């Protein structure tokens, strides 16, 4: 039996990785600038635009309060518009991205807000433009926090991707439901869960390792 | 007389409050900071000194009045004009404000990158050498001591070749030894580069050690200003006097302090503090008092320091009570300052 199932598990794992990778990538491309803007545009801040900040904050909150499974069904017309179809793995990337972008935006906003205001002041005193402050100070200083935030986003997306079976998305979650639950094959369910645990563990460890590479705040074993 | 490097003309800073009267951080400040000198602004926290300093590079804007830096009105500048002024004004901070993600060399390179300079490396190497951190070039701030971090801050502030250096409590987070070294470095930079330094502090010792000029700020107003030496020898305002306590001169020996009382009745000796100023600091005035007037003087404590490059001495002496007034007059006539601290039996 395992000889039949192994290719299936492998294929599903690749589908999950594909969905998660694409939605993280696009989600970061949208959520990154959004998060930077949210972190720097309150009244009196670097890019002070309080009204736009409030409006975008509301949009982000609205997107984040919609339960994912409802979001998936609610945006089917949009999915069809973007992906050309509303079913399948590629189509599933649309709701996953729409769920991940505001989440990533908040995570990056938090990481950027952690940067000491004194550094922004120092950069302003050097005659830096707001763009230079973002590029040369905020992003590099927030990098460890940004990496940890993205790690958290990827782990969450692995969980979300298991739900897209509801609209014909494939991947590990879908496999677990179809074989494990509907065909009474608990061993498939178990295998899916084990693979997911391993995946999450790998992502978490990798994320923490990369973040620590960026983190120069605490001296490591360099000696003083 | 050179034009001042920085001048504040009737500068007021108000912070509007919702549904209440404005908070006035600075009121009608008029102050000139001389070219090439080290000027200190001393005040308690909340006195407005930080707001005043930040007006020089436009981090704060005056609500009224003008702030002129090298002949340009900072308060009126904005955008690229303001950024150009800022490149001519370096700043160092109490908490250093170094980028944790950049090495020493990369931190010092930052203002050069911001200014769009090419050929940054040789300039950075030269600055690192100037502040004595060659061995730490590729270290990260987390691996440095407080004093080393402030040296990086100083090198970074000097990177774009500014004419003015602002120091925001730069030594307040440092221990006394390190403070000494950082102040020495600032004094050397002032001398070698002819850089105008404006610093704020709450420690009179910092003013004593490197400032040739001082302004005392209290409740958003300058209460006293002038050459450090003059302010130290004749402090007019109570705030100045309280800052000066324990910084200049001497403290009374315990055994005298315990026996001291306010009234002269029946006392054998008056305890008098004598302040020697300027050239008089080196005159043997006490010897002359004894030789010419036959008053025997009992020295209880004394110190001579250098303030604003001039000798500044304080002595606490015991003078026979009945000769005290006469002796004080004699000394005052010869340019010394005297103050009766009390009497002992």
Image (cartoon, coloured by chain):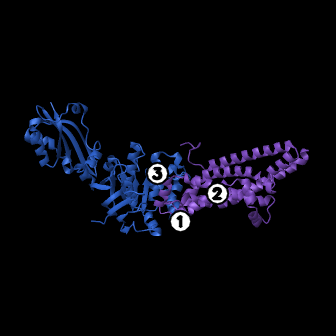
Chain colours: A purple, B blue
Query: Is the same chain shared between marks 3 and 1?
Result: yes
Label 2: chain letter = A
Q: Position of residue B188 (x, y in %)?
A: 37, 54
Q: Say which residue appears at 77% left-offset and 58% top-offset.
A: A92
- Circle 1/circle 2 CB separation < 8 Å: no
The one nearer the camera, B20 or A45, is B20
Farthest front residue in view = B19
- Circle 2/circle 3 CB separation < 8 Å: no
Could you say which quadrant of the image residue A136 lies in? bottom right
Q: Position of residue B182 (x, y in %)?
A: 40, 49
- Pointer 3 local density, CA inside 10 Å: few below 14, some 14–19, many at least 20: many
Where is mark 1, residue-wise?
B118
Where is mark 3, residue-wise?
B96
Question: Tag on residue B26?
Answer: none
The one nearer the camera, A153 or B250, is A153
Determine whether the residue tagged by mark 3 lies in a helix, strand or loop.
loop
Q: Position of residue A202 (x, y in %)?
A: 73, 46
Give the mark toward the camera: 3 or 1: 3
Q: CA distance from mark 1 to mark 2?
A: 47 Å
Q: CA distance from mark 3 to mark 1?
A: 25 Å
The one nearer the camera, B84 or A82, is A82
Q: Say which residue appears at 44% left-offset and 63% top-offset.
A: B86
Q: Position of residue B291 (x, y in %)?
A: 10, 40
Q: CA distance from mark 2 to mark 3?
A: 40 Å
Determine whether the residue tagged by mark 1 lies in a helix, strand or loop.
loop
Where is mark 2, residue-wise?
A62
Could you say which quadrant of the image residue B54 lies in? bottom left
């Amino acid at each position: 039996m395992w000889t039949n199932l192994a290719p299936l598990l492998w294929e599903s794992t690749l589908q999950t990785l594909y969905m998660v990778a694409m939605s993280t990538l696009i989600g970061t491309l949208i959520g990154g600038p959004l998060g930077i803007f949210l972190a720097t545009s309150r009244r009196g801040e670097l890019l002070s635009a309080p009204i736009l900040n409030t409006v975008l904050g509301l949009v982000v909150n609205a997107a984040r309060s919609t339960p994912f499974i409802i979001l998936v069904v609610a945006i089917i017309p949009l999915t069809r518009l973007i992906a050309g179809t509303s079913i399948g793995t590629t189509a599933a990337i649309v709701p996953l991205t729409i769920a991940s972008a505001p989440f990533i935006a908040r995570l990056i906003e938090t990481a950027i807000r952690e940067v000491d205001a004194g550094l922004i002041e120092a950069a302003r005193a050097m005659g830096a433009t707001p763009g230079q402050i973002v590029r040369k100070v905020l992003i590099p200083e927030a990098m460890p926090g940004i990496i940890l935030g993205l790690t958290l986003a990827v782990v969450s997306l692995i969980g979300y991707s298991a739900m897209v079976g509801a609209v014909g998305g494939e991947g590990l979650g879908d496999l677990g439901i179809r074989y494990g639950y509907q065909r009474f094959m608990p061993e498939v369910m178990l295998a899916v869960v084990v693979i997911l645990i391993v995946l999450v563990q790998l992502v978490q460890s990798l994320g923490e390792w990369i973040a620590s590479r960026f983190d120069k705040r605490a001296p490591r074993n360099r000696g003083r | 007389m050179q034009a001042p490097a920085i001048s504040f003309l009737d500068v007021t800073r108000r912070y509007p409050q919702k549904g209440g009267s404005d908070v006035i951080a600075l009121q009608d400040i008029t102050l000139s900071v001389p070219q090439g000198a080290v000027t200190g602004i001393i005040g308690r926290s909340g006195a407005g000194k930080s707001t005043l300093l930040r007006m020089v590079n436009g981090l704060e804007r005056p609500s009224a009045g003008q702030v002129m830096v090298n002949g340009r009105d900072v308060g009126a500048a904005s955008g690229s004009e303001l950024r150009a002024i800022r490149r001519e004004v370096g700043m160092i901070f109490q908490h250093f404000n170094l980028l944790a993600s950049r090495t020493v060399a990369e931190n010092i390179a930052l203002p050069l990158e911001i200014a769009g300079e090419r050929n940054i490396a040789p300039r950075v190497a030269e600055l690192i050498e100037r502040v004595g951190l060659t061995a730490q070039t590729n270290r990260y701030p987390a691996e440095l001591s407080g004093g080393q971090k402030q040296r990086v801050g100083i090198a970074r502030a000097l990177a774009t070749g500014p004419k003015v250096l602002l120091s925001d409590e730069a030594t307040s987070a440092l221990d006394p030894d390190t403070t000494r070294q950082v102040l020495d470095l600032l004094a050397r930079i002032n001398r070698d580069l002819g850089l105008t330094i404006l610093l704020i502090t709450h420690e009179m010792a910092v003013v004593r050690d490197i400032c040739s000029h001082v302004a005392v700020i209290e409740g958003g107003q300058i209460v006293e200003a002038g050459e450090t030496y003059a302010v130290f020898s004749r402090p007019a305002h109570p705030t100045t006097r309280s800052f000066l306590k324990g910084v200049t001169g001497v403290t009374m020996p315990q055994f005298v302090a315990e026996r001291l009382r306010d009234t002269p009745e029946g006392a054998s000796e008056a305890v008098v503090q004598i302040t020697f100023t300027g050239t008089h600091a080196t005159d043997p005035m006490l010897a002359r008092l004894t030789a010419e007037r036959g008053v025997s003087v009992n020295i209880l404590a004394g110190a001579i320091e250098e303030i604003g490059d001039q000798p500044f001495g304080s002595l606490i002496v015991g003078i026979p009570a009945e000769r005290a007034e006469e002796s004080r007059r004699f000394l005052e006539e010869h340019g010394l300052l005297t103050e009766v601290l009390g009497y002992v039996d």
